[in-house]
Structure formats: C-alpha cells, structure tokens
Image: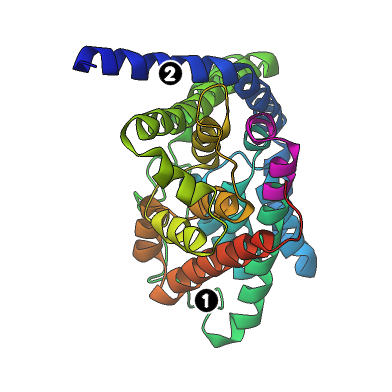
Amino acid sequence: MDFVGIVKQLLTGIFDEFLYILPFIAIGVLLEATIRTLKWHVKIRHALTKFGGWAIVLATLLGAVSPLCACATLPLVISLLLAGLPLAPAMALLVTSPLMSPAGYTLLNWELGAVWANMVLFSAIALGLFAGYLTQLLRPYGFSEEIIFRQKLPEGNFHDPDYPVEELRCDCGKQLSHRVDRCTHNKFYVFLAKFWEGTLKIGKFALIGITVEVIALQLIPNEWISMLLEGTGVMPIFALTFATIPLHMPQVTAAAMLYGFVSPEFGEGVQLSKGAGIALLVGGPVTALPVMALFISMFRKRVLALYLTICISGTLILALGYRWLPFSF
C-alpha cells in the first residue's frame, strides 16, 4: 500500500473509533460539568483541613470524583498544604485524582466494561488510602509539612495573576467558563461553557489514545501487542509499569488506547489480562514528566522519592494481586 493509502487508512480508523465513543465522552463530560458548575468538589476541598483523622479518607474520595489530572492536581495540593492540610491527605488526593473521574469512569464502563471500570475505581481508592496512611506513618521521619518544601513559598493566592511563583500561578481566570461567569453570573451559561471546556479536554485525551492505538496496530507486530496485553506472566506487568513512568498518559488516553486493542469492531480483539490492564490504567496516569519536574522544583527530593515509591509499588501490588485472582473477567 502506498503512503497516501496508509494515511487514509489511519485517518479512517481514528475517525471511526472516535465517533463510536463520542456519545460516552458526552455523558462523562456532562457529569463533570455539573460537578464543576455546582462546585461540589471545591466545597469538599475546603473542608479537608477540618476533618482530622478522616481527612485521608475524604481526600481519597474527593480524588475519585475530581476531574483533574496529575498536572492540575499538584498545584492544588500545594495550595492546600499552605492552607494547613497535612501531607498525608494531600498525598492521598494527589495519587487518587489522576486515576478516576466521572468522565473516566463513564468511558471505562463503555469501552472495557463495568467490571474494569469498578476495578479501576477500587484500585484508585485503595492506592489513595495506601498513599495517605503510609505518608502518615512516615511523618516523623522527615515528612512533616514544615520541612517538605525546598524553600518557603510566598504568601498569596495562586489565582492572583501577580503571584510570584510562575509554576504555581493559576490561569483559570482566562478560561471561558470564568469569563462567562464574570459577565453573566448565569449558572446555565457557565454550565455550557464548562461542558465545552470538558469536551475539548476529554476529547483531546481520548483522541490521543485512539491515535496511538491505531498507529500501533499498523506498525507494531500483533504478537508483540498480544504478548504485553494478554501475557499471563509477571514480566508484562513490570514492563508496562516502568515503561509508563515518564509518559503523560491521562486515564482517558490509556482507556481509549486499550479499547482499540480489545475491541473486535476496531482492534484485534486482544483478551486483556488483569495484571497488564491495571499496570497501564493505574501506572500510566499517576506518573508523568511534567509532574516530576514540578515536584523537583517545589519539594525536597525525599517527597518525590516517596511519591514514586507509592505509585510504582502500589501499581505492582494491585496488578500482581489482580493477576493472581483465581477467576477471570
């Protein structure tokens, strides 16, 4: 097949798959836009500093319904730490938030099935609790809030356009929904604006996943893909867990990519193994180079080491645990 034919085939495959999952992207975005418009996640977030020992559980549950990825969650976590939130619930929120969201759950449920969606939801909550309580145990050993930052951060509001730390400065005031809110103060118009923003964000991540999957099916031998995703041993789990550490792979991207491989309508109908699926769906979203860069610039090295240890060991424990369950999905 000539180059033009290959490109046409790739574009056709990408378009067909994206069109197929578009209604379920809309359902997920609808849920997230409702939560953001009513500011439920903001209200819970403000309460985190007042819940004492329950803060880890609450932060984990908040992370499971938050529409934020790892890169967007980290500045939020830093602002909560400066507001008095202990590191343990902050770490629980930071770990859980990239793994689950209303849109992510909706897409997982459609693309891979309810069992996989619930399995990833359980994994996100389990990993968040593991992160929070492990950090709590290590607090006396150099992980108290007073000594985790590389330097004292200036006081002020991250939403202020003049906040002196550029890496933490939030530009949400420039978003369409905030401009609509300032001009109209109409919740319905704000909802429509947030729905549009969510559609662009979730659609972009889904499109990236589909594109990677379609290209991989064209260029990578099928037996290599099957060896990784269908593998019954432990090596595919370790390979996928460590291969995804530097990648910026939000949950929607990972789910869309896997969908193309396992769907008999579009992909090769790969029988996704439990361990490999969790390694990709959990390990991919929690680690990304932009997050690591912000960690290094803001926190002491021990905090980044703890975060990576939690993410990698937690992913392996979950993936290997599912791998050895005595039944299949």
69 left or right of 327?
Answer: left
Q: Is residue 239 above or below residue 179?
A: below
User: What is the crowding at mark 2: few (fewer than 14 residues within 10 Å), some, or many (at least 20)?
Assistant: many
Say if 145 sits above or below 288 in the image: below
Q: Position of residue 270 (x, y in %)?
A: 55, 38
Whichever of labels 2 and 1 marks the residue nearer the N terminus, that label is 2
Q: Which residues lie in the magenta part?
A: 106-120
Which residue shows up at 57% across the image and 26% down it? 264
Secondary structure type for disc 1: loop
Residue picked out by circle 2: 13
| Residue 101 seen by the camera | yes
- Identify which amino acid the numbered label 1 is placed on: Glu
The single residue placed furthest to the bottom in the displayed view is: 141
Q: Residues within 10 Å of mark 1 (few under 14, many from 20)?
A: few
Tell me residue 311's x, y (percent): 53, 63
Q: Nearer the viewer, residue 59 or 115?
A: 115
Whole-percent x, y for residue 35 in the image? 70, 32
> In screen coordinates, is 100 left or right of 241?
right
Residue at screen point 48% across, 78% down: 147
Determine the residue positioned at 73% across, 53% down. 122
Magenta segment includes 50: no
Q: Is residue 115 magenta?
A: yes
To which quarter of the image does residue 91 belong? bottom right
Any part of residue 84 in sight: no
Q: Which residue is mark 1?
A: 146
Secondary structure under the numbered disc 2 in the rendered image: helix
* Closer-to-camera residue (54/14): 14
